[in-house]
Image: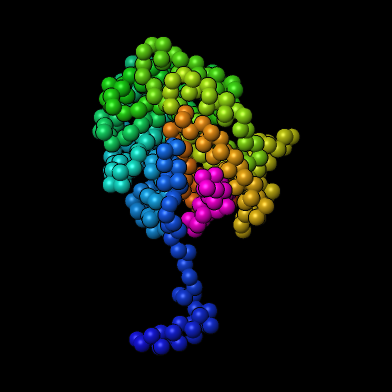
Amino acid sequence: MSSLTWIVLSSVLLWTGAETFRPQPAAFNPEPGLKAVFTGDFLIGAALNTSQILEQDSLAKDLIPVQFNSVTAENIMKCEIIHPGWSDYNFTLADKPAEYAEKRQMHFVGHTLIWHSQLAPFIRQIKSPDSLDLFMKNHITTIASRYKGKVDGWDVVNEALEENGSMRKSIFFNLLGESYIEKAFQYAQAAAPGTELYYNDYNIEQPAKRAGAIALVKRLKEKGIRIDGVGIQGHWSIHSLNLQHIEESVKEFSALGVKVMFTELDLTVLPNPWDLRGADVNQNFESNPAMNPYPQGLPDSVNAVLADKYKALFALFLKHKDRISRVTFWGVSDRNSWLNNWPIRNRTNYPLVFDRNYQPKPAYYSILSLKK
Ligand code: G3I
């Protein structure tokens, strides 16, 4: 086809509004990305879902390695997938994030070894302390050994604390007492001595739960058990972000001699059911439009608040960059965020710095502006 014919044909199709000629969102891939801008400060990570890890998501494929230098698998290394039966391990999917990170020479976080949630059903049938201890030993030894030299750091124990700082009454605590934490770290140390070992939890920037996490780290250290870092998850809200608590936590955790990392960062912009004091507990939140106020798009004013909150947060991270080793977003784009389905299903949330088409949001530029 001559170029003149091409131009005429294109013009006619565009004029008639032919869908095929409408531009698709282009992959956003500017250099330098976040990871380059924050080099020397801290790692910039993302939790990846299965299609991103398998490179089936075309827009994510090019963007992720430019923007991020650390990878966490959002779900596919969890117990219910990797260890579905007592002697049954399934590494078909779980091997993929390790391969993904290795191919791109990215830092790789193993998520997670011991967690009360997303457990394989057989574990709920375990009734004796010895059997549960044996499960923990087998689980940790098998998985941590398999990924030795590939995983840079393990979330060894995830979410072991209640909001008041006491131990969560999980199956592990109920059968083994608080010593299950020590055992978990010891088994991980034995299986992967060169891998960093972390305790990871949400809301541990808040004073009562923070005190519980500090006590947990101290107990391990006093017994000579290695723990290298504390992961503050960072599932926060633009309506209640508390920078003072976050700063206090960075100082107090790092004073224990462990690395501090923000491991699951996102900022919800939506209302939460429990913010509605006096609300009827039987209210059907799923069909309540007030709980899903932005189904068609985020108003500029809220987008600007989100950008301001991210900017303030990263300014704080930079202030304490000597104590913070990594900041990982829990997801890449708003389209994939777990917060579209929690705590209410099928909402439209906007918690990350890339929008549903993987385009940068004002929050992305507000973070970058801190380094200009
Ligand atoms: O894979 C199934 C799919 O086959 C099925 O059709 C679909 C129907 O609901 O469910 C899919 O599984 C979902 C899974 O995510 C994969 O998308 C589960 O229902 C859903 O519960 C699960 O949610 C995950 C959640 O952990 C489970 O507790 C979220 O994606 C994941 O982001 C979230 O991550 C946790 C961290 O691991 C620990 N810290 C808190 C954080 C947020 O809850």
Q: Quadrant of residue 209?
A: top right
Point 41% across, 19% down: residue: 181
- Residue 253: x and y in percent read 49, 23
Point 49% across, 20% down: residue: 255
Q: Quadrant of residue 155?
A: top left
Q: How many marks?
A: 0
Task: Note whether 12 is above or below 245 in the view shown.
Answer: below
Q: Split into 4 quadrants, where in the image is the N terminus?
A: bottom left
Task: Note whether 67 is above or below 6 in the view shown.
Answer: above
Residue that extends furthest to the front in the rendered view of this protein: 372
Q: Tell me the colour scheme of the image.
A: rainbow
Point 51% across, 52% down: residue: 354
Q: Quadrant of residue 139?
A: top left
Q: Foreground residue, 138 or 329? A: 329
For the magenta stretch, what is the residue range? 349-372
Is residue 74 visible in the rendered image? The answer is no
Judge from the rendering whether residue 22 lies leftward or rightward of residue 274; answer left or right.
left
- Residue 203: x and y in percent read 55, 29
Q: Is residue 267 magenta?
A: no
Q: Is residue 369 magenta?
A: yes
